[in-house]
Image (cartoon, grey):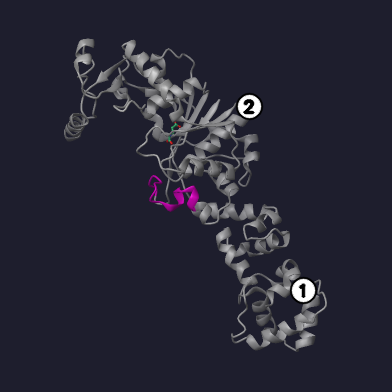
């Protein structure tokens, strides 16, 4: 079983969507189940409604899952596991106050050494623990040996006991920490492979250590994806608008183009333009580059244009408020001038808007309009041209400029002969 485990703490980052896509593809390739686990145990950071937003994004991108659950539902399981560790003396109660720990962290920072837990509460006797009325956290004891694993992208990795440290698994309010809840849930859901962002590499030995102490001996494979850099070469953060999937949708990028781009990023693929379904046929997780990938909005724009070109025209027309293949085809004529829904929308709106009869071409436009109102059905642009020039006597620029304004609401644009075949059935509506 594979899983996607987002935290509902903000807008979905493109790095997270990439993780979701890769997990989904590999689950489909291996014919394994795929679940979504909303990691909502950090109550202070959760944002109401973000879980729904994440699921909506997955649906738009075409990621289907077998099950979705909120991690907080497993709270009693996490608590039982922590108690078991206490009983087996694999973990201990820690009464160090947040102020005390902060001071130690600060001191370590000043002396330029990595902070490690002092070990103060590890040796407390049962009697001392019982006699202490203060709130306590539960800390796991650090391992005595190195923890090693082979990452499918990064290769062999090894962590010293001190780097893992005696870390907190249950907070003072008795909610599990991220590492504990994650390690336990991956165990109870029989996860076979974890694909996630590189920022979690140092959590992996901690999670392996937790499961080792719980006596779980099945090995889980890991693949940590390199980070995504912004166009300045820095880690893409919330400050980069393009890091938010929601922002990309608002800018008029298609879900299928975003998925295509995220699969292509830092990867060797047999094609450049493809669908998620097609990628399932050839995707190879181990081909993902170890180096960080750089986000390139222009490349995404190019991919978006290609997907708009290929899109079923009727489907495309829905983005502009129609359900008519002709409008989808009309939108495609504008792909030279725009590469997103947002950029093409004003072009389609201009076609259907009230036309500028008070402009310098107003008088000629009026003549063309009157002639068109009385016109028979004109199938081709040649027929339209012939009929209108005969009826109005207009020629050259005096004919084409006002005709373009009347038909498209713009002075410049794609060839009228290309546009006409798609807008002719709306002619009476357009020339108003
Ligand atoms: N909830 C974590 C995150 O959103 C992911 C943890 C994981 O995949 O293990 O970064």
Which range is magenta? 233-247
Residue bearing the label numbered 1: 381
Q: Is residue 289 above or below residue 415?
A: above
Quadrant, the N terminus: top right
In space, the residues marked 2 and 1 are separated at their CA atoms by 53 Å
For the question of whether residue 83 can be seen, the reply is: yes
- Numbered badge on residue 53: none
Q: Which residue is mark 2?
A: 31
Q: Quadrant of ligand 1?
A: top left
Q: Does any atom of ligand 1 lie closer than 8 Å to the CB of label 1?
A: no
Q: Nearer the viewer, residue 23 or 145?
A: 23
Q: Which residue is nearer to you in this view: 112 or 121?
A: 121
Pointer 1: residues within 10 angstroms few (<14), some, or many (20+)? some
Q: Is residue 5 left or right of residue 343?
A: left
Side (left or right) of 390 relative to 195: right
Q: Nearer the viewer, residue 100 or 155?
A: 100
Q: Nearer the viewer, residue 69 or 209?
A: 69
């Amino acid at each position: 079983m594979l899983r996607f485990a987002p935290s509902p703490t903000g807008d979905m980052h493109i790095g997270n969507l990439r993780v979701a896509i890769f997990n989904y593809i590999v689950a489909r390739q291996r014919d394994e189940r795929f679940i979504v686990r909303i990691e909502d145990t950090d109550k202070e950071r959760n944002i109401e409604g973000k879980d729904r937003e994440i699921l909506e994004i997955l649906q738009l991108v075409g990621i289907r899952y077998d099950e979705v659950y909120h991690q907080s539902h497993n709270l009693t399981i996490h608590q039982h596991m922590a108690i078991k560790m206490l009983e087996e003396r694999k973990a201990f109660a820690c009464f160090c106050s947040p102020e005390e720990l902060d001071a130690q962290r600060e001191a370590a920072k000043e002396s330029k050494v990595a902070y490690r837990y002092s070990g103060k509460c590890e040796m407390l006797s049962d009697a001392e623990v019982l006699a202490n009325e203060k709130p306590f956290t539960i800390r796991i004891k650090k391992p005595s040996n190195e923890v090693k694993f082979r990452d499918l992208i990064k290769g062999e990795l090894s962590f010293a006991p001190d780097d893992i440290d005696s870390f907190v698994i249950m907070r003072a309010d008795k909610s599990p920490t991220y590492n504990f809840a994650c390690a336990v849930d991956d165990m109870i859901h029989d996860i076979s492979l974890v694909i996630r962002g590189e920022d979690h590499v140092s959590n992996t030995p901690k999670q392996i250590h937790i499961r080792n102490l719980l006596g779980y001996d099945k090995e889980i494979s890991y693949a940590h994806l390199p980070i995504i850099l912004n166009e300045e070469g820095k880690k893409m953060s919330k400050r980069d608008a393009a890091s938010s999937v929601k922002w990309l949708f608002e800018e008029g990028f298609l879900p299928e183009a975003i998925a295509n781009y995220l699969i292509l990023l830092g990867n060797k693929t047999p094609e450049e333009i493809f669908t998620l379904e097609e990628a399932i046929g050839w995707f190879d997780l181990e081909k993902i580059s170890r180096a960080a990938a750089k986000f390139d909005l222009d490349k995404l724009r190019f991919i978006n244009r290609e997907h708009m070109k290929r899109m079923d025209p009727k489907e495309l027309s829905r983005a502009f408020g129609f359900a008519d293949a002709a409008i989808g085809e009309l939108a495609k004529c504008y792909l030279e001038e725009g590469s997103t829904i947002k950029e093409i929308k004003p072009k389609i709106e201009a076609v259907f808007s009230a036309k500028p009869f008070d402009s310098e071409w107003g008088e000629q436009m009026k003549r063309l309009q009157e002639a068109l109102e009385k016109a028979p059905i004109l199938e081709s642009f040649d027929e339209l041209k012939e009929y209108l020039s005969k009826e109005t006597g207009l020629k050259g620029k005096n004919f084409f400029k006002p005709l373009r304004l009347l038909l498209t609401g713009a002075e410049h644009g794609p060839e009228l002969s290309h546009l006409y075949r798609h807008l002719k059935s709306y002619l009476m509506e357009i020339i108003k």
